[in-house]
Amino acid sequence: MKPRRTKTLTAAGALGQSAAVLSLLAAGLVSSAVPAYAADDVDEDGDVVCTHTANTKGGEDIRCELRIMDDMVIRGTEGADTIVVSIVLLPGDFPAVGEGARIEGLGGDDTITVLYGRGGGIAGTVDGGDGDDTIEVRAFSSDDAPREGVMAGGVVSGGAGDDSITIEGQGPGMSDRAGTAANAGTVDGDDGSDTITLNGGTRAAGNIGTVDGDDGRDRIFATGGEGSAGNGEDGVITGQGDEITLAGGGAGGAGNGAGAKVDAVGGKVTATGGPGRGSGEGGTGGTGNAGQILGASDVQLTGGQGGAWLGTGGTGNSGTVTAYSAQVTGGSGSENAGSGKPGGNGGTGNTGSVRATGSLTVTGGAGSDGGDGGDDSGSGSPGGEGGNGGTGNTSDAESATGPLRVSGGAGGRGGAGGNGTDPSGGTGGAGGRGGNGGDANTGTLTGTDTPGSAVTGGAAGAGGRGGTGVDDRTDGKDGQAGRGDAG
Ligand SMILES: [Ca+2]
Ligand SMILES: [Ca+2]
Ligand SMILES: [Ca+2]
């Protein structure tokens, strides 16, 4: 196949292919602004861009192996169509569906797939139309000049019906530059109960554009790639009564990023920070919410777990939340990575502003357990210290009518001492000290006079058991329990 570039397909060029369309145009039945393609779609050189084959579902199988550009319209039928747009050749710096171009499924349960290459995904419009449509947009391959799945100005709309829309950003490519967001344009589920799934590429957010679930009980998922937010920086997600789930990627990405906004009237929002970087001394877990989450019925925010080893858990909320009920929890400390290592500290529950008209629970993250010491013929190794629990609230937490419960995180257990195994003189290692419980509150609490409210310090971690030696005199000492803080 010779390399080629599709040129602009003008109305005049299209009409040149079809005397029938020309007569419709003359009769005023077809707009010259939107060319209609009765059978095969061709460019102005006469090259076939899309082929149409009738399928057994009353629709067409439409395959387009070059990008769809400018004012070109790929239109299905009122039956169930399968439309695939894939760029076989890397065509240069152009989107798969160009600005002004449209793919329309029309009625029926259609499947529309766009596989994009170097130039990026959708700068025009993909519209499933009526029916329960499945729309998928993902990169054809990893590449060194990645773009978004839906680019700024691009639109993906499910149309009426219960649609499934899945969009993936591009991976990191051959260089170590970041990948791309799944959506930098507009994704609209439209009427019906839609499922919208956005997965960011490496170090890129799931959403930096606009997502609207629209009418119906929708489910919206936005997940960041490694080290990035699910809903990143300028991302805006709007849903009414919807279920919205945001997750940061590994290496500490936030669930909902700083500057991001979720307008979730009456819906449920879950935002979880990504786990901390997991090599060497682990990194801090990501923040659950660093942006705005407004108007939800129920909000669950959790910081990411610290990275192994020693990583601190992420903050549950550092942004602004208004909800009917909310639970905000700091991330737990890292899992210990091995013999005698200390556990990571829990993250802070809330450092931002949380206002619930009903109940509100804010909890510091749990410290993780210290690692057990290793056995040795001479002297067993000491156990590691348990991590300290995180502080519950350091800033501004308010519950208007329901109970306000604020507590520090529990300290981790100290690691057990290793055993001295030589029967003639082995000495047991000392158990590790337990982690301290976290403070409940160092900030401002409003609403603690409501029945059921409580402000409670975190529980102390238990000390580790000493290792055994050759006899009682050479057994290791048990570790001390951690200190539990008052509320
Ligand atoms: Ca259709
Ligand atoms: Ca449809
Ligand atoms: Ca829909």
Image (cartoon, grey):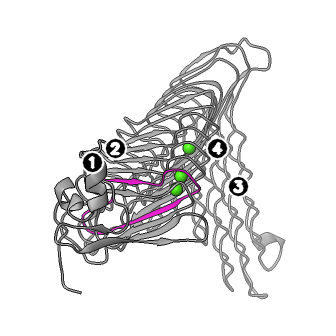
Residue at the right extreme?
Answer: 472
Q: Given contact means CB atoms under 8 Å apart, are the residues at marks 4 and 2 in contact?
A: no
Residue receiving disc 2: 29
Q: Quarter of the image containing the C terminus?
A: top right
Residue receiving disc 4: 436
Q: Nearer the viewer, mark 2 or mark 3?
A: 2
- Give SS at disc 2: loop
Residue receiving disc 1: 25
Q: Amino acid at mark 3?
A: Arg
- Mark 4 or mark 3, which is nearer the start of the sequence? 3
What is the magenta range? 100-121
Q: Amino acid at mark 1?
A: Leu
Q: CA distance from mark 4 to mark 2?
A: 78 Å
Q: Quadrant for ligand 3?
A: top right
Give the vertical position of 51 relative to 156 (above or below). Answer: below
Task: Tell me if residue 123 can be seen.
Answer: no
Q: Is residue 91 left or right of residue 398?
A: left
Residue receiving disc 3: 413
Q: Nearer the viewer, mark 4 or mark 2?
A: 2
What is the crowding at mark 4: few (fewer than 14 residues within 10 Å), some, or many (at least 20)? many
Q: Which residue is pictured at 21% across the width and 54% down the height?
A: 11
Q: CA distance from mark 1 to mark 3?
A: 79 Å
